Image (cartoon, rainbow, N blue to C red):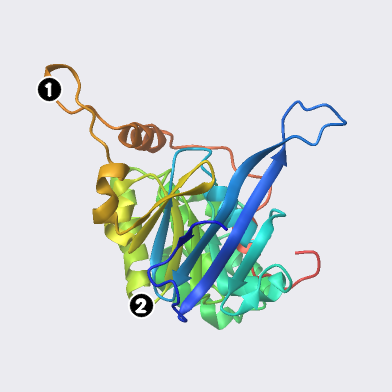
Amino acid sequence: MGKTASTQPDNHDAVLRVTNLSKRYPQPGRAWWSDATITAVDDLSFTLDRGQALALWGVNGAGKTTVLKCLLGLLDCEGELWLDGADLRKDGRTARRRFGYVPQELAFHNDLSVGESCRFYARLKDVSFDRIPTVLEQVGLTEQERKAAGALSGGMKQRLALALALLADPPVLLLDEPTSNLDAATRAEFLDLLAQLHATGKTLLFTSHHLAELEQLADQVLILQDGAVAAYGAPAELMPLLNPRPVGQGGKPRASAADDRSQETADAHEQLAPAAAEYALVGATRRGV
């Protein structure tokens, strides 16, 4: 039985329950007759309370994004996944309408305006166009409605991705490294926006390696190591694990590995976008989506 992370083990207000989640991939380079695998997520169990913000923390390869993709049905996996009483494994399409997803890498139809993009995905999600002005106001894009998506800045594109995730007014938002491609000033603005959504009752599950995100957003942190729970608790309780400060020459603290990774990521302003905008299709109702 996997280690369970929960603020209250018997809490009946949990909106998300993950039990014994495991994901294994074929071992790269294995012989055709071999069944050797590598484990990305190892017997992981946790609950997410309604209105809570839970951060998944860990180094690259710890299994953070894999957990989100298993919840979204983008990867086959083992274990039990329940969202608001619905079985994600058996009735995933219906249950996933309660998720809003913002991926780390964004992809838009660059020739469509912000408003046209919202209308396109509103049709996919079977959402009334009347909802669009509300979400644009929520994310601060009302004045950008006629602007082409391809002409938006990085921060504005992140806001558009959040608007698309909010179209169906889902109770739970999944965010994969939500500020990793933003500069410091834009990151602070986007964190303020997420904090406002959380204050209105949105449940957040997000992956991160930025301490500022944990300090501003997270109620609880789940530290992953090799796909399993290494520690769980409030950010203040886990700070020695989240931000170790090894002593360098002269007795001065050296920057931690987490700080180094954060700086490297913040400096990477452009990344290749994936072929499909998976985040916008979560909760879509059309066949084959």
The C terminus: image quadrant: bottom right
* Left or right: 123 in relation to 191: right
- In the rendered image of this protein, does residue 254 appear above or below residue 126? above
| Kind of residue sitting beneath label 1 | Gly
Q: Where is residue 37 in the image (x, y as percent from the top left)?
A: 71, 37
Q: At 45% from the left edge and 52% from the top edge, which residue is drawn? A: 207
User: Mark 2 or mark 1, which is nearer to you?
Assistant: 1
Q: At 31% from the left edge and 43% from the top edge, which residue is drawn? A: 241
* Left or right: 265 in relation to 283: left
State the image quarter where residue 76 is shown: bottom right
- In the rendered image of this protein, does residue 191 appear above or below residue 168? above
**Whole-Å distance between the Cαs marked 2 and 1?**
45 Å
- Seen from the viewer's position, the closer of residues 157 and 53 is 53
Residue 112 in sight here? no
Q: Earlier in the sequence, mark 2 or mark 1?
A: 2
Residue corresponding to mark 1? 251
The N terminus: image quadrant: bottom right
| Kind of residue sitting beneath label 2 | Thr
> Please, what secondary structure does the residue beneath circle 2 have?
loop
Density class for disc 2 (Cα within 10 Å; few <14, some 14-19, many ≥20) is: few
Mark carried by residue 200: 2
Q: Position of residue 8 (x, y in %)?
A: 39, 72
Residue 240 in sight here? yes
Q: At 64% from the left edge and 78% from the top edge, which residue is drawn? A: 86
Density class for disc 1 (Cα within 10 Å; few <14, some 14-19, many ≥20) is: few
- Seen from the viewer's position, the closer of residues 235 and 139 is 235
> Please, what secondary structure does the residue beneath circle 1 have?
helix
Q: At 26% from the left edge and 48% from the top edge, which residue is drawn? A: 239
* Left or right: 269 in relation to 282: left
Q: Which residue lies furthest to the top in this view?
A: 249
- In the rendered image of this protein, does residue 50 appear above or below residue 68? below
Q: Where is residue 3 in the image (x, y as percent from the top left)?
A: 49, 57
